[in-house]
Amino acid sequence: MRPNEKFEQNGRNGEHIITNGFCMPSLIMKKRDGGKLSRHEIEYFIRHVVKGNVQDGQLGAMLMAMFIRGLDDAETASLTRAMTHSGDVLKWPKEWKGSIVDKHSTGGVGDKVSLVLAPALAACGVKVPMVSGRGLGHTGGTLDKLESIPGFNVSLSHDDMLKVLEDVGCCIVGQTSNLVPADKILYATRDVTSTTECIGLITSSIISKKVAESLDSLVLDVKFGQGAFSDTEEMARQLATRMVKAGNRSGVKTEALLTDMNSPLGYMIGNALEVAESIDCLHGKGPKDLTELVKQLGGRLLASANKAPSLEKAFSMIDKTLHDGTAIAKFADMMKAQGVNADVADKLCAKDADVFEILPKSEHTTELKAKTSGYVHGIDAMKCAVVSGKLGAGRTKAGEAISPDVGLTLSVQIGDKIEEGSTWVTVHHNGELPIVLFEKISGAIDIKPDIKQTTGKVLGVITENISEQ
Ligand code: URA
């Protein structure tokens, strides 16, 4: 044993652990008292978390110390790096170097961007190994949406992913069990110790999973507003800045867009409904806000991967795939490669298909009418999310079943003119629509007599190139 090594009796089963001069209580004390943890201390912490050597109380105490004292840029970068290497790191053929791209969204209501973006990017020749999540909250996540397509398989091994990327160029899959195992442990404890809302912990959780995909370029969609994780643009800006720095320091070219989530994205909210709207968008007939966001996020990735001579050209390359049939063809190919019967995939992607001949449809629909004429000043994204969730589109506990067929279809967006008595939203439900939900959704629209000026959803861009420290 070297002189500075100690025995520490803190294993879960009471076993002794040899440490390199650190011990958990002293690391917790250092952070508790406002000290900065070094890269080696953070690596030590994560290594022992994954080995199961850190007691529940110690983990909770460290997370609370990190939450209260905060993590600076260097600590966040060290934590991100240690978490990334806590499990498998995906490996790709060297010929793909420079072309491996992905996006992460902090989550929003009606956010179906991934379903459109991955095929559009693949149609431009880059590789998109999109590792996505299930929704925990009011609305389903990307995987839940895709699973409303009969046969869609989100559980691919690394070899399966390689094949799909080789053949198609994009895949959308769930996290494999050994990708960033440290995050699974930390996240579960953060959830039960009120330590989730910490910028350093959120950043390392999100960025480590993306770095473990071995990406060359990453774009982040950081949303703010009623239906988002960050209430204000300022909070979103802080989170985006930290994530951009952590991504770049981890060797992934990272940029972020700040986007408005006060009203839903597009017109459709709900799992199968959002697949239907994504298919429209892939045919070049999507809502303006969704199409614009896909262009902006995809264009930034193409430019970052040096696939376009300018940002403007990159935006138009993405737009072209949505109008020339190449993005929808990639979506069909991705579905087939991920388990969907070829006839079903072709039918879903046929021009002017009735996609609800294939996608699940709710038993009932109820239309709500505008009580006054005027202009739409607001559609409360949070109220839409809560109602969709209560109808069964989301889950409150991991592993809970969701209903693929329920949700909302809006007939208007902010700025639109609306006449009294016309339908502004259709609720898709199974069984009777409870009166509380009817009342809640009725209160989601704000109609005023004066014209409402609108801005697009994208309200800022965060880019920062930081060299490795
Ligand atoms: N999503 C994640 O993956 N981690 C967080 O901490 C928050 C959102």
Image (cartoon, rainbow, N blue to C red):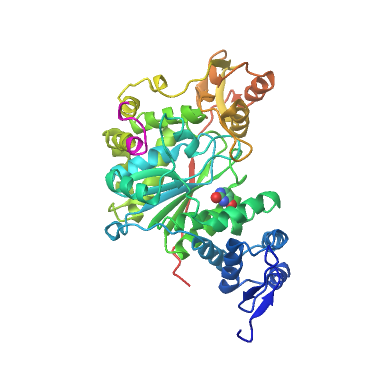
Residue 121 magenta: no
In the displayed structure, would residue 189 be above or below residue 335? Answer: below
Q: Camera-side residue: 112 or 172?
A: 172
The residue drawn where x is 35% and y is 54% is 100
Q: Is residue 278 visible?
A: yes
Q: Residue 87 appears at what percent x and percent y?
A: 49, 60
Residue farthest bottom in this picture: 3
Q: Camera-side residue: 45 or 426?
A: 45
In the displayed structure, would residue 370 be above or below residue 252? Answer: above
Residue 342 magenta: yes
Q: Camera-side residue: 241 or 455?
A: 241
Q: Please identify the quadrant where the N terminus is shown.
A: bottom right
Q: Residue 161 appears at what percent x and percent y?
A: 36, 48
In the displayed structure, would residue 433 be above or below residue 105? Answer: above
In the displayed structure, would residue 447 be above or below residue 42? Answer: above
The residue drawn where x is 34% and y is 21% is 353
The residue drawn where x is 55% and y is 27% is 403
Q: Is residue 196 visible?
A: no
- Left or right of 458 in this view: 343: left
Q: Camera-side residue: 306 or 120?
A: 120
Total number of numbered discs in the rendering? 0
Image quadrant where residue 316 sits: top left
Instruction: Name the magenta segment's main secondary structure.
Output: helix
Image quadrant where residue 338 sits: top left
Q: Residue 44 appears at what percent x and percent y?
A: 59, 70
Q: Residue 317 appears at what percent x and percent y?
A: 29, 43
Magenta residue span: 334-343
